């Protein structure tokens, strides 16, 4: 059973940085894509970034491009989201997700709160 556990959220001032981690277990992930999504209060969940485990092909939402960096550590089976130049509008619950290449996002973490104060 695949499990994803996020950590690293918190409260930060605008312009600051946070790094989120997503530890994956219970499977082999060579054919997976891992991603980050976020959901702000009263808004729909939105895509933030994704990375293909096998070759690190990466995509970002336009709203975070140039500020956020997604990466992965194969040995630790962990995906990271480095968030720099944070803005109040980045405030949301951030979710890690995973799924096989070409398939749906089958697996989700429990979410971690990120709050950016102005």
Image: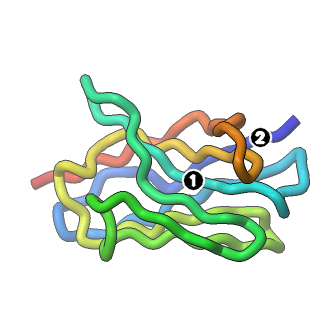
Badge 2: how crowded within 10 Å, few (<14), some, or many (20+)? Answer: some
Q: Secondary structure at mark 1?
A: strand
Residue name at image x 31 percent, y 63 percent = 64
Estimate the x, y position of residue 11 in percent, counting from the top left. 30, 52
Residue name at image x 19 percent, y 69 percent = 15
Q: Quadrant of the C terminus?
A: bottom left
Q: Nearer the viewer, mark 1 or mark 2?
A: 1
Q: Which residue is mark 1?
A: 35
Q: Residue farthest to the top?
A: 42
Question: In the rendered view, does 48 fall on the left or right side of 109?
Answer: left
Q: Which residue is mark 2?
A: 3
Q: Nearer the viewer, residue 41 or 9?
A: 41
Estimate the x, y position of residue 93 in percent, counting from the top left. 40, 39
Residue name at image x 40 percent, y 34 percent = 45
> In the picture, residue 50 is in which quadrant?
bottom right
Estimate the x, y position of residue 59 in percent, counting from the top left. 49, 65
């Amino acid at each position: 059973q695949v499990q994803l556990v996020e950590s690293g959220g918190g409260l930060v001032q605008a312009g600051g940085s946070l790094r989120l981690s997503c530890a994956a277990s219970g499977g082999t992930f060579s054919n997976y894509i891992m991603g980050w999504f976020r959901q702000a209060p009263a808004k729909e969940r939105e895509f933030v970034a994704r990375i293909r485990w096998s070759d690190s092909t990466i995509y970002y939402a336009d709203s975070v491009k140039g500020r956020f960096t997604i990466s992965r550590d194969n040995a630790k089976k962990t995906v990271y989201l480095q968030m720099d130049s944070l803005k109040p509008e980045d405030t949301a619950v951030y979710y890690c997700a995973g799924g096989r290449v070409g398939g749906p996002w089958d697996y989700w973490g429990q979410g971690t709160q990120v709050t950016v104060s102005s």
